[in-house]
Image: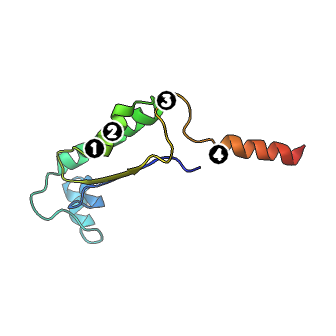
Amino acid sequence: MSGPKWFVNATKYGHCDFYDDEARKMGKMYCATCKQHCNFPEYRKMGKEIIVHFIDGILNNNRSSLEKIENGRFDIGSMTKHDLRGYSSTPGPFCNRVSTLENSMLHVES
């Protein structure tokens, strides 16, 4: 079973927009960047917030942190999409693939 998935896309920003000014200028040669009305510090802040909410949601089973990602209410315009794939924020792992694999290996070796 694959784990849950969250997709967040700040549509007018590119990968290099996380960089500082000098690196972003060089990155424009190979990666699209924001062209107008850009707030690069806020874009980087959004990325940090998503990572913190994701870690808190998964490791601490904090459903409200995951909902912050799913609702997509960031200061930077973005599109969000998610597929929980059976994940529940109740205590316990969301994936049983390892235990299933271990069990099948035990049967083979027996």
User: Marks 1 and 2, Cα distance to the nearest angstrom?
Assistant: 6 Å
Q: Image check: 101 left or right of 74? A: right
Judged from the image, the secondary structure of the residue bearing numbered disc 3 is: loop
Say which of marks 3 and 4 sits in front. 3
Q: What's under tag 2, amino acid-wise?
A: Glu
Q: Is residue 98 above or below residue 56?
A: below
Query: To which residue does mark 4 refer?
Result: 97
Q: Is residue 99 above or below residue 38?
A: above
Query: To which residue does mark 1 refer?
Result: 71
Q: What's under tag 4, amino acid-wise?
A: Arg
User: Marks 3 and 2, Cα distance to the nearest angstrom?
Assistant: 14 Å
Question: How many numbered circles are shown?
Answer: 4
Q: Dot 4, crowdedness within 10 Å: few (<14), some or many (≥20)?
A: few
| Mark 4 or mark 2: whose residue is earlier in sequence | 2
Query: To which residue does mark 3 refer?
Result: 90
In this view, the residue farthest toward the right is 110
- The location of residue 16, given as percent across then percent down, is 28, 60
Q: Image check: 4 left or right of 12? A: right
Residue at the image position 18 percent from the left and 53 percent from the top: 77
